[in-house]
Amino acid sequence: MAKEKTLYSCNECGGTSPKWLGKCPHCNAWNSLVETVAESTAPARNRFAALAKTAEVATLADIEASDVDRTPTGQDELDRVLGGGIVEGGVVLIGGDPGIGKSTLLLQALDALQRAGHKTLYVTGEESGAQVALRARRLGLDGSQVQVLAEIQLEKILATLDVQQPAIAVIDSIQTVYSEQLTSAPGSVAQVRECAAHLTRAAKAGGTAIVLVGHVTKEGALAGPRVLEHMVDTVLYFEGDTHSSFRLIRAIKNRFGAVNEIGVFAMTEKGLKGVSNPSAIFLSQHAEPVPGSCVMVTLEGTRPMLVEIQALVDSGGPSPRRLSVGLDRDRLAMLLAVLHRHAGVACLDQDVFVNAVGGVRISEPAADLAVMLAITSSLKGRALPKGFLAFGEVGLAGEVRPAPRGQERLKEAAKLGFSVAVVPKANAPKKAIEGLTIHAVERVEEALQVLRTLE
């Protein structure tokens, strides 16, 4: 068998070079050459084999579509994020900060799957088998029959998958795996892309569900080429403060379920435990209402969740600060301008700090109205009524725009005992919700007027 040659291909023009150069000799693009492998002239297995057999051209109406079968992982919150469970032949990429709990969660899930009768394999490239066994005992998984392979060479991992034929396999982590077909170090762009492509083909061909653990950069994004996220079926992000016991896992991409779905876990001595009522985490337990606090209902995937928005307005001098945690800082500046222009509430010489309690990150604009009411409450030193909540998007003209799935938000609030709600007029339900008084508003001024009537 002839030895395969290493070439360097340009990401811009596709040209090749026998050695690495800072500038592509074909299109003159800088830093665009990436290590690749030239196909061997000797007959060998094609490295670029298709994921499925070639089929005839057919119309969508003639193709038989069937629902995919899902295998529950034994972790309800993880199943929620995955869309119901692991899919046969599916490839999941999960990333998060070091020490956030990725390996812990996956080891617990594999143990539950193994006890349910599914064959599992845990491939560790960062720890020895003894270290994995030590963690399993610490998590209370005594007597676990999960198979463990300490290996980082791709070819040996693929051979083991072919022999063992597990239902679910975890690769921890993809940045440690390397292929002998490339000369670059593990974790390089070429190695990560090549190894992920081979593992994805193995999953589709053999029906093994594969979970890839990925490193993240200091900005929190998944390390490696962006094509890695395109190749896999599901991308999950582990979020949370390492100083807090709560963790969030969020679906950024999911070909078999809803995106932006979140699962909430609590870190305990025995590992991660799912939190069935996450709203309790994000609501501070005040004995009495305090100024600067307003509760909103945010929508994470299919789950409505109550979050407390806190604001602190204080004298700031000639250079006031605007700081937000868990919310968009630029949007905070916009809301302060709208509040001043259309409601006459000025914070020009005040420091404004806004925080979403519990470390949750809110990206949807439905938090606008709650943020503005919390700022007004803190500025005037008047607490909002007990059992009060608000949600709605605020436009630059001062109008209050509707939030998606407002009925579900209001029903969740009523279920948790909230009694007063200020919502966009378009979200006002046609049928009254028991125990919940709803004030529908069209503009910011109307919302502040409602607050004055409730004081």
Image: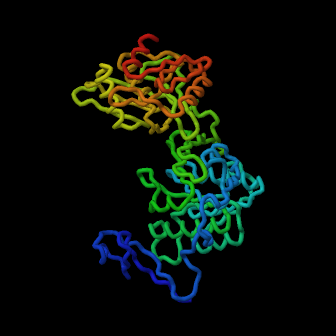
Q: Residue at x 44, y 39 (%)?
A: 363
Quarter-of-image position of residue 255: bottom right
How far across and how far down the image is residue 117, in percent? 78, 56
How many marks do you count on the picture?
0
Pick the front one: 6 or 244: 6
Residue 131 in sight: no
Name the residue rendered at 58%, 84% in the picture.
44
Residue 410, can we see it?
A: yes
- As displayed, is residue 321 above or below residue 441? below
Q: How is the image coloured?
A: rainbow
Give residue 440's position: percent from left, percent from top.
Answer: 47, 20
Which of the pair 55/121 is nearer the observer? Answer: 55
Picture coordinates of residue 159, whole percent (x, y)? 65, 74
Decide which of 201, 439 is in the foreground and name it. 439
Q: Is residue 260 above or below residue 184?
A: above
Residue 371 position, x and y percent, is: 41, 28
Q: Which residue is drawn at 59% across and 19% down?
A: 432
Residue 206 to residue 441: above or below: below
Task: Determine the residue positioned at 48% across, 32% down.
Answer: 403
Residue 13 against residue 88 in the figure, above or below: below
Where does the C terminus fall, quadrant-wise? top left
Q: Quadrant of the N terminus?
A: bottom right
Residue farthest left in this picture = 318
